[in-house]
Image: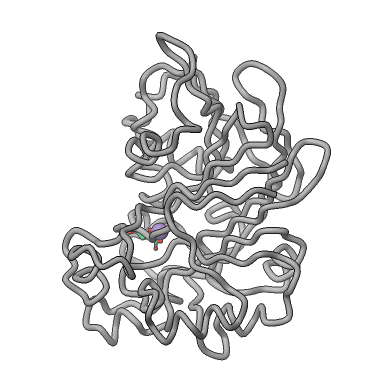
Amino acid sequence: MLRIIVLGAAAGGGFPQWNSLGPNCARARAGDPATPSLTQASLAVSANGDDWFLLDAAPELRIQIERTPELHPRVAPRHSPIKGVVLTSADVDRIAGLLTLREGQPLSLYATPKVHAVLDANPVFEVLNREKVARLPLALGTPLNLVPPSGEPSLEVTAFGVPGKVPLWLEGGGPVATDLVGEDVIGLEVRAVGGGPKLVYMPGCAAITPEVMARAAEADVLMLDGTLWTDDELVAAGIAPKTGRRMGHVSMSGPDGSIAALAGITRPRRYFIHINNSNPVLAEDAPERRVLEAAGWRVARDGMIIDL
Ligand code: MLT
Ligand code: MN
């Protein structure tokens, strides 16, 4: 058994984004049921219903936990079914929620050594008491049991490098490589210890490489970077000078887009996650949404539960 709860499905900024009056955000803010609001991307995963690991820690983590009964404390005075967190990068929308978990609750925090080095270099994360929150390394390509602070492991994870870049806030002023495959941006394969159906989670992915395709093809459920519909979406809307490629995100549409590149993949249930507020597919009545669904994809939304 594997239960996946979508805690948040939006890209950085959430939906609606605080400073956006784009058409999607205006509709969401007006309460249009075709454009439901979304918090920033994160999943909760469990193989036994009792022990949960978070995949990424979004800035809205406190509210995500409160609206998810599976993640509420079960024993007074202090308890949490959340046994740990696995990070896929050091982007703000992946790590800011760690600051919400600062109440001395034992946790296992998994990340690549490079992402751990980023956290180690930021003293604010010392609010996670190292005597209670173990910082544990993820080695790429090697299956690893996620060890809870006490009790037996129930989930196994395999981290793999995905094309991407350093976090926006660490770019500095110089040229930025956007197709690094290494410890900056990773994908996660998650299954129960001992085997069974597999989730593949890649909320940031700059290009569909042969390895990305192979990992995706073996999934039972795929959650893939759905930031933008078109590569120049932000440029065309006059929002920002950056293309999706420059931001480290493959687009959904177009000949190099993820829908075309993964057209041959039929095994997994396929969801887009980390969807930017500018993306037209956020509107259930958009023609782009129909194109996406006709190609066998779905748009993840907050609160969605997937049982495998
Ligand atoms: C991204 O996905 O590109 C980042 O979340 C950008 C950011 O840090 O705002
Ligand atoms: Mn992001």
Which color scheme is applied?
one colour
Considering depth in this image, is 239 or 27 the residue closer to the camera? 27
Asked if residue 55 is positioned above or below residue 31 in the image, the reply reads above
Q: Quadrant of residue 231?
A: bottom left
Quarter the N terminus occupies = top right
Q: Left or right of 238: which side holds 174?
A: right
Residue beneath the point at 42% across and 13% down: 78
- Residue 161, position as x, y percentages in the image: 63, 57
- Residue 116, position as x, y percentages in the image: 51, 38
Residue beneath the point at 53% across and 70% down: 206
- Residue 250, position as x, y percentages in the image: 51, 75
Asked if residue 106 is positioned above or below residue 217 in the image, the reply reads above
Q: Left or right of 13: which side holds 18?
A: left
Ligand 2: give its quadrant: bottom left
Asked if residue 288 is positioned above or below residue 95 in the image, the reply reads below
Asked if residue 253 is positioned above or below residue 226 in the image, the reply reads below
Q: Quadrant of residue 119?
A: top left
Residue beneath the point at 66% across and 73% down: 209
